[in-house]
Image (cartoon, grey):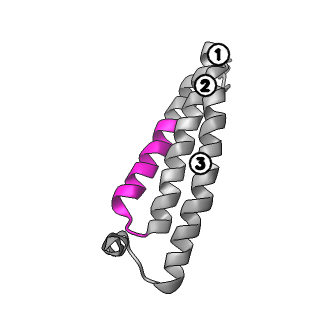
């Protein structure tokens, strides 16, 4: 009888990270809603974090996980500020695109 080992390896995590990053990139390039674009950028950041953790586990090095900790702290601060700005602008304009935000520059 053939036994299949389905234990995830680092390459599985790197492939998943590449797929998540591609989905995020596709969302940023295709969608025009700033809230959706913001979520796609966060998806891309988390995909990079997943690859850092997978490679840190593969290399038995703590530096990748340390970088992920700092990236998550910066991403949390970005979410607080960026999401606050986006939501406050979207309250005034319900159907807003990124092109409308470019006109706000002055």
Q: Residue at x 61, y 17 (%)?
A: 58
Query: Which numbered tag is attached to residue 64?
Result: 2
The crowd level at tag 1 (other Cα within 10 Å; few <14, some 14-19, many 20+) is few
Mark 1 in CB contact with mark 2 (< 8 angstroms): yes
Outermost residue to the top: 60
Residue occupied by mark 3: 75
Residue occupied by mark 1: 61
28 is within the stretch colored magenta? yes
Query: Which numbered tag is attached to residue 16?
Result: none
Of label 3 and label 1, which has the lower sequence position?
1
Q: Which residues are magenta?
A: 16-33
**Image depth: mark 3 or mark 2 in front:** 3
| Residue 8 makes an appearance in the image | no
Q: Nearest the camera: 104 or 93?
A: 104
Taking 32 as reference, is 81 left or right? right
Residue 80, percent across and down? 62, 60
Look at the image and tell me in which quarter the N terminus lies: top right
Outermost residue to the front: 106
Of label 3 and label 2, which has the lower sequence position?
2
Residue 4: quarter of image: top right
Q: How many marks?
A: 3
Q: Secondary structure at mark 1?
A: loop
Q: Is residue 85 above or below residue 56?
A: below
Q: Is residue 59 above or below residue 103?
A: above
Q: Secondary structure at mark 2?
A: helix
Q: CA distance from mark 1 to mark 2?
A: 7 Å
Q: CA distance from mark 3 to mark 2?
A: 16 Å
The crowd level at tag 3 (other Cα within 10 Å; few <14, some 14-19, many 20+) is some
Q: Nearest the camera: 105 or 32?
A: 105
Q: Secondary structure at mark 3?
A: helix
């Amino acid at each position: 009888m053939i036994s299949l080992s389905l234990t995830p390896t680092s390459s599985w995590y790197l492939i998943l990270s590449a797929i998540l990053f591609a989905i995020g990139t596709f969302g940023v390039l295709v969608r025009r809603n700033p809230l959706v674009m913001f979520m796609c950028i966060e998806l891309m950041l988390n995909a990079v974090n997943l690859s850092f953790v997978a490679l840190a586990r593969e290399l038995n090095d703590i530096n990748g996980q340390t970088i992920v900790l700092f990236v998550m702290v910066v991403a949390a601060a970005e979410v607080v500020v960026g999401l606050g700005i986006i939501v406050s602008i979207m309250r005034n304009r319900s159907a807003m695109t990124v092109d409308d935000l470019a006109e706000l520059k002055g």
